[in-house]
Image: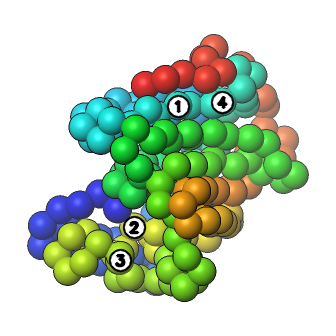
């Protein structure tokens, strides 16, 4: 997750406690996904540049608007981007992509990092589990992403292979039936950031 000192760890812990107790309030709205992904990439650009990484966004030009809590989805994307940058290989790449699936849509972050072995993968969403060592991150990032996905009626899938990289895919349900479709954002199919 996005690192910080003791205050950030306390805030992350309280966020997780609220999430697990069902006390998180969501503010659902319809919005274009590509501008949100662009915004997140811009926020993380100094970290990706410092690591010598290329970040790509792959979203179809006609991708429909999504219905979600924009601020919480932004937090998820920043968290996943931060991990993908931190655990990547020098001169690696990160790809953010979105797709439509039956009953919903997916947002995926794929990196070319070291990947995770089966034991690490099995514990990846456990609260406080971290491979970074004491004082280097909260160990709450993926557990929060997992919890947010569940609270929004979605799911989280992680696939990883050592030496190849990791793909984290968030599935969220489509907007409620009967909603009027809105024109999609006129964005790029693939953009290097």
The vertical placement of 43 against 104, above or below, is: above
Query: Mark 3, mark 2: which one is toward the viewer?
Result: 3
- Residue at the spot 73% in from the left edge and 30% down from the top edge: 64
Crowd band around label 1 with a 10 angstrom C-alpha radius: few (<14), some (14–19), many (20+) = many
Q: Secondary structure at mark 4?
A: loop
Crowd band around label 2 with a 10 angstrom C-alpha radius: few (<14), some (14–19), many (20+) = many
Decide: marks 2, 4 in contact (CB < 8 A)?
no
**Quadrant of the snapshot with the N terminus:** bottom left
Crowd band around label 4 with a 10 angstrom C-alpha radius: few (<14), some (14–19), many (20+) = many
- Residue at the spot 12% in from the left edge and 67% down from the top edge: 5
**Quadrant of the snapshot with the C terminus:** top left
Mark nearer the N terminus (3 vs 1):
1
Q: Which residue is mark 3?
A: 130
- Residue at the spot 74% in from the left edge and 41% down from the top edge: 99
Q: Which residue is mark 1?
A: 56
Q: Between marks 4 and 1, how big is the CA–CA gap?
A: 10 Å
Q: Between marks 3 and 1, how big is the CA–CA gap?
A: 26 Å
Q: Between marks 2 and 4, how big is the CA–CA gap?
A: 24 Å
Q: Secondary structure at mark 3?
A: loop
Here the colouring is: rainbow
Q: Is residue 181 visible?
A: yes
Q: Which mark is residue 141?
A: 2
Q: Between marks 3 and 2, how big is the CA–CA gap?
A: 9 Å
Instruction: Using residue 133 as the reference point, say whether residue 69 is left or right of it.
Output: right
Instruction: Using residue 180 as the reference point, say whether residue 30 is left or right of it.
Output: left
Q: Which mark is residue 59?
A: 4
The vertical placement of 126 against 96, above or below, is: below
Q: Secondary structure at mark 1?
A: strand
Q: Between marks 2 and 1, how big is the CA–CA gap?
A: 22 Å
Mark nearer the N terminus (2 vs 4):
4
């Amino acid at each position: 997750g996005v690192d910080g000192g003791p205050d950030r760890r306390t805030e992350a812990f309280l966020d997780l406690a609220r999430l697990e107790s069902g006390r998180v309030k969501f503010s659902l709205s319809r919005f274009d996904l590509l501008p949100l992904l662009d915004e997140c990439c811009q926020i993380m650009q100094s970290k990706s540049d410092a690591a010598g990484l290329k970040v790509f966004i792959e979203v179809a030009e006609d991708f429909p608007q999504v219905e979600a809590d924009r601020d919480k989805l932004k937090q998820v994307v920043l968290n996943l981007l931060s991990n993908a940058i931190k655990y990547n290989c020098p001169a690696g790449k990160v790809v953010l992509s979105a797709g439509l699936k039956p009953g919903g849509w997916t947002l995926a972050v794929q990196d070319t990092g070291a990947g995770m072995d089966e034991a690490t993968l099995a514990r990846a969403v456990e609260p406080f589990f971290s491979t970074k060592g004491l004082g280097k991150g909260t160990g709450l990032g993926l557990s929060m992403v997992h919890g947010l996905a569940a609270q929004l009626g979605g799911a989280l899938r992680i696939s990883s292979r050592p030496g190849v990289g990791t793909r984290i895919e968030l599935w969220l349900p489509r907007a409620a039936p009967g909603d009027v479709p809105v024109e999609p954002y006129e964005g790029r199919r693939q953009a290097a950031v």
